Amino acid sequence: MRLFSSRAPRASVAERPGARHPVLHALVGTWPGRAVLVGGSVKLASLVSRSLIGSVGGVEIVGSLGTLALLVGLAYFLVRLVSIARRHLLWRVRRKLILSYILVGLVPALLIITFGLVSGLMLFGSVSQYIVTTRVRTAVEQAQFLARTCAIELARLTDDADATAFLERKQSALASRYPEASLAVVPVGRRCPGAEAPPAASPLRPARMTSAGPWLHLEPPHQIPAWVPCGGFAGLVAYDVRTAGAGAQTQLVVRAAVFADGAAPRFAVVLDLPVDERTALRMRDETGIELRDISATDPRPQSARAGARVVELATDGSAQQRRLQPSWVAMLDFSDWETGRTGQATLSIGMSIGEIYNRLSPARLGEMSFGQLLIIVLIVVGILFLFIQFVALIFGLALARSITGSIHELFVGTVQVQKGDFSHKIEVKARDQLGELANSFNTMTSRLTSLLAEMAEKKRLEEELRIARDIQMSLLPQGPLRMPGLQMTAHCSPAREVGGDYYDFFAIDEQRVGILIADVSGKGTSAALYMAELKGLMLSLSQIHTSPRELMVAANRIIAHNLDARSFITMTYAVLDMGTRTMTYARAGHTPLIHLTGRGLGRRAQILIPDGMVLGLKFDRGEKFAACLEEVTLPLTAGDLFVLFTDGISEAMNADEDLFGENRLSTLVEDHADLPFDELRERILREVRDFTGELGPHDDMTLILLKVEDALEQVDRVEQVDRVGQVAS
C-alpha cells in the first residue's frame, strides 16, 4: 500500500512515437522559432539583393524588419535558455547554498580587494602623473632660464666670432647634464611694441643663423615662426621619427625661444633639451617612475631630420619586470613649431610602487623606512585576510556539503517511500538536527509497516462493525405496523456503529399487539450482543405471557443469570388490545411514557411514570423486582397519542450541558400533534439534533409514536394501503 501517489515519468519529446526533434519543433512549431527562420531568411535575401542591385530604400526597410524579427526570436530563446539552465543548475540545494555563499561571502571580499587595488593604483598613478608633469614643467622653466641668460650675454658681444665661441662654451657647459642639448641663434626682423630700445653699445647684428650642439633630432630653426610672441616660447615640441620597420614614432623635446631685449630684437636664442634615455634614467633614479612610449593626437607632429635616431625611453629593466609594474599615463601639452597649434601627447609611465612610496615617506625606523614598515603591515594583514577568507570558504563548502548531503539523502528516502519501499534507511552521519531528522525518518519508515498493518486491521474491524450494524438493524421491525385502529412509526439510530437500544412489535392475536422498547446499559458491541439476546428471549416470552408484568418478571429471572454484573436493562412493555380499546403496560426502570389524550380543546401531554426496577440486578431471586413492578391499564380513545423513547432523546445535551428533558419533549408533542404522523417523528428528531448542535448525539436514540385512530381515519388508511398495494402489484 502506497502512502504517496506516484506517476510514471513522462516520455521526452524525442522518445514519443512520431514526435519531432525538440530543436526542429522549437524552430517550426513556435512563433519565436518561426520569427527566427523568417527574419534570417529576409535578412539573407536583403543582403543578396544589396550585393546585386545596390542599396535601395525598400530593400533596406525589409532588411531592418528581418533583423528585428531575428533579434526578437533570438532574445526569446536566450531568455528561455537562461531559465532552463537556471532551473537545472540550481535544482540541487547544494548548488544554491554554494552560490549564495559565493555571492554573500566571497564576491564582496573580492570586490573590496579589487576596490583597494584600484584605489591604490589610481592614487599612485595620480602621484606619478603629478611628478612627471612637474618635472617637465621644471625642465621647461629651466630651458627658458638658460635661453634668456644666453640672450642677455650674447647682446653684450660685438663680434660674430665671439658669439659662435660663446655658444660652443655654453653648449659644452650644458652637455654635462644635457648631452644632447642644442643651441641656435636665429636672426629676427620684427618689432616688439612697448619694449625698451636696445643699448647703443650692442653692435652685434648676426646676419645668419648660428648653432651649437648635436641637433640630432630636428634641423636647427632658421627663423622664428610668426606665432611666437615677443615674450618668447617655452614648452614641449613633438616630432615623428620614421623607421622602416616600426613606422612613425613620436618623440618630445623641451624647447625655449627667447628674443633679445629691445623694441626691434636682432636675434633670438633657441634652446632644445630632447627627452631621451638620460632623462628617463634620471627620472627613474630620482622618483622610481619609468618613462615608456609616447603617442600624440592631432595635430600630427613634424618630421624629424633625416637620419634622426629613435629614442628608447625604457631603461635597462627586463621586459618581465616592466610587465609586472603597473602602468599609467601622463597627458602633456605640446605645440607644433611650424603652425603653433597645440595638441596632447600621451606618455606611458611605469610605476615602481615601493620606490615611489619610499620617496613619499622618507622617515626611517632603524634599517627600514616608515613606509616600508607600513607596507609590511599591510601585506601581513592582507595575507591574514586572504587566509581567513580561504578557511571560511572551505568551512562554508564543507557545511553546504553536510547540509545538502543530508537533504539529498532525505529526498532519496522520500522517493523510495513514494515507490512503496519502506525498508529504505538513511545513514546518520552527524549528531545534529539534520542527524535527528534522518533518525526520525528511519523511525518513521520502520513504523510504517506496523501502521499499515494496523490500518488494514482497523479497516477489517470497521467492515465487520458495518456488517454487525446491518445485522442489528435487520433485527428491528422492518416496515410499518399494520393493525386496524392503530397507527405506529419508529426510529432507531445508534451513537456508534452498533448500539444497545431495542424496540419491537409482537402480534399476539388479531386484536392484540405487544410493543417493546428497551435500553441495554452501555454502548457499542457488548450492548449490541445483549440486545440480540434480548430479542430472542422476548420473542419467546411474548407468546407465553400476555401480561406485561408477568413477562418482565420471567425475563428478569432469566436475564439475571446471564447478564454481566456491571450491566442491566431498562424496558417498557405494553399490550394494546384493540378489541377492548385498552393499553396495559409496565415500566422496568425505563424512561417515562408521554400520553397525549384524544382531540379536544386544551389537550395536555401527561408523563406516565409507573414504578419498576431495571432488569438484571442480582439482589435476590427476583422477589424485589416483582414487588416493585407496577402494571397499569389505560383506556384508549380516538386520537390518543403515545410517545415511547430512550434516554438518548431526553438526555441529549447541548454545549451548555443542558438536557433536552421530558418536559421539552412533551411541549413539542403538544404543539405539533396535528402534523402528519411521519412529519411529527421527523420534527421531534430535528429538534433534538438542533438542540445538541455540533456536539451530536452521545447515546443511542430510539423513538416510538403510537396513535389510536377513529373509525373514519381507519377506513381512509386501509383504502390508502390497498391503493398502494395495487400500484405496487
Image (cartoon, rainbow, N blue to C red):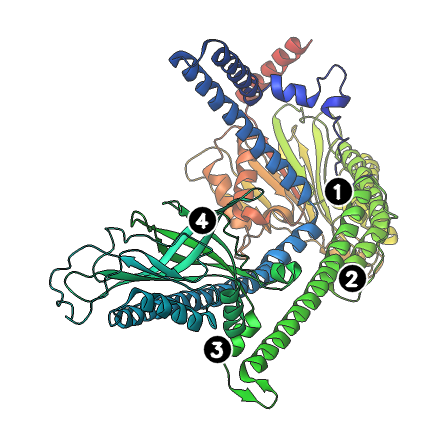
Mark 2 lies on a secondary structure that is: helix
Asked if residue 174 is positioned above or below residue 672 in the image, the reply reads below
Q: In the rendered structure, which amino acid carries the disc numbered 2?
A: Gly
Question: Closer to the N terminus: mark 3 or mark 4?
Answer: 4
Give the CA distance from mark 4 to mark 2. Answer: 86 Å
**Label placed on residue 459:** none
Q: Are marks 3 and 2 in contact (CB under 8 Å)?
A: no
Q: Residue furthest left?
A: 194
Q: Which residue is mark 4?
A: 305
- Mark sitting on residue 498: 1
The Cα atoms of the two marked residues, 3 and 2, are separated by 60 Å
Disc 2 crowd rating (10 Å Cα; few below 14, some 14-19, many 20+) is: some
Which callout, 1 or 4, points at the residue further toward the start of the chain?
4
Q: Residue at x 46, y 61 (%)?
A: 275
Can residue 518 be spotted in the picture? yes
Task: Name the residue nearer the viewer: 46 or 656.
Answer: 46
Q: Amino acid at mark 4?
A: Arg
Going from N to C along the chain, the mark reached first, 3 or 1, is 3
Residue 658 place in picture, x, y as percent: 53, 56
Marker disc for residue 360 = 3
The three-letter amino acid code for the residue at tag 3 is Leu
Classed neighbour count for the residue bearing mark 1: other residues with Cα under 10 Å, few (<14), some (14–19), many (≥20): many
Q: Is residue 189 left or right of residue 278?
A: left
Amino acid carrying label 1: it is Val
Q: Which residue is mark 2?
A: 435
In percent of the image, x 48 and y 44: which residue is there? 667
The mark that comes first in sequence, 1 or 2, is: 2
